[in-house]
Image (tube, rainbow, N blue to C red):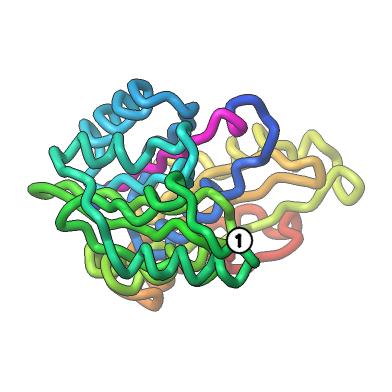
């Protein structure tokens, strides 16, 4: 199973907000054992969103989109996704009632025409109600492709994603991915010539070419981080798979290691 994340919002492209949604979703998908090779950020433009969806599905089975589900004219993610699958937008009474109830709780007792559009969902889609805000999550697909639409505000996105994970995403894979981080000592503890990324990579040699588990090095200000990542049918299987490699790295680096722990 290969997934791709598309985050919609001109504010992301302009750097007005930090894209924490992509970081959160990446980690959650990795925990589920779902591979991901690309992420995209696209502005609030209907044609460019359609192009981003086309490109994503040319290389992925599952697309998860955040942002652009609100009631304003630049919120066009839902429309673009529906068009991709050839679906019409239809009125959803439960979503309408939810939006109206939420607005009432905010002291807004007259629902506007733009707010009513949030009750339009692609025909045949699975709708996930928003426990925090207004716009619902949406799951739809065609053939072997599926798309999950999530609101942009992180608090809303996380709540709906957790529900989407239970009812749909977790059923797409029987694999899990687990990572172990190995932190090398920093320049304050050992000479940089011994614990820089290049010297560490030279010591590890062919280990860095492993496929399962994979091993990668990352240069950090306080020392090099080595990440060992394995996939398996269960967490225990993944840990068993990586154990010989972790032990081998520990034997090679010996006193250069500061700590070893499972990644969050």
Q: Position of residue 154 (x, y in %)?
A: 58, 55
* 243 w.r.t. 17: above or below: below
Q: Which residues are magenta?
A: 2-12
> Disc 1 designates what residue?
250
Circle 1 Cα neighbour tier, 10 Å, few/some/many (<14 / 14–19 / ≥20):
some
Residue sitting at 30 percent across and 28 percent down?
50
Classify residue 122 as left or right of residue 202: left
Secondary element at tag 1: helix
Pinpoint residue 47: horizontal percent, then vertical percent: 33, 21
* Rendering quarter of residue 15: top right
Residue extending furthest toward the front:
110
Q: How many marks?
A: 1
Majority secondary structure in the magenta region: strand
Residue 99 lies within the magenta run: no
Q: Quadrant of residue 81?
A: top left
| Of 85 and 166, the residue lying toward us | 85
Specify whether residue 68 is in view: yes
Q: Is 218 placed left or right of 25 in the picture?
A: right
Q: Is residue 52 above or below residue 20?
A: above
Who's the residue at 24% across and 63% down the image?
Answer: 126
Name the residue located 27 percent from the left edge and 61 percent from the top edge.
92
- 125 w.r.t. 215: above or below: below
Residue 235 x %, y %: 39, 74
Q: Quadrant of the C terminus?
A: bottom right
Give residue 98's position: percent from left, percent from top. 43, 69
Q: Is residue 207 visible?
A: no
Residue at 32% x, 56% y: name it: 138
Q: In the current view of this chain or complex, which residue is farthest to the right?
A: 188
């Amino acid at each position: 199973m290969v997934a791709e994340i598309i985050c919609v919002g001109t504010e992301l492209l302009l750097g007005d907000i930090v894209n924490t949604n992509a970081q959160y979703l990446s980690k959650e998908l990795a925990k589920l054992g779902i591979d991901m090779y690309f992420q995209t950020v696209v502005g609030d433009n209907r044609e460019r969103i359609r192009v981003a969806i086309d490109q994503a599905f040319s290389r992925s089975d599952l697309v998860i989109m955040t942002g652009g589900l609100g009631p304003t004219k630049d919120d066009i993610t839902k429309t673009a996704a529906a068009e991709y699958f050839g679906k019409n937008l239809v009125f959803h009474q439960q979503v309408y009632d939810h939006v109206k109830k939420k607005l009432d709780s905010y002291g807004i007792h007259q629902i506007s025409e733009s707010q009513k559009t949030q009750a339009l969902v692609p025909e045949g889609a699975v709708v996930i109600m928003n426990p925090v805000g207004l716009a619902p999550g949406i799951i739809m697909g065609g053939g072997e492709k599926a798309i999950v639409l999530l609101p942009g505000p992180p608090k809303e996105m996380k709540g709906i994603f957790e529900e989407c994970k239970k009812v749909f995403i977790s059923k797409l894979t029987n694999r899990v991915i687990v990572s172990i981080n190995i932190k090398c000592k920093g320049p304050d503890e050992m000479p940089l010539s011994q614990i820089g990324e290049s010297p560490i990579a030279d010591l590890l040699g062919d280990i860095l070419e492993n496929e399962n588990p994979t091993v990668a090095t990352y240069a950090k200000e306080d020392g090099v981080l080595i990440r060992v990542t394995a996939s398996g049918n269960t967490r225990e299987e993944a840990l068993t798979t990586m154990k010989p490699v972790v032990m081998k790295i520990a034997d090679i680096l010996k006193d250069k290691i500061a700590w070893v722990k499972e990644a969050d």
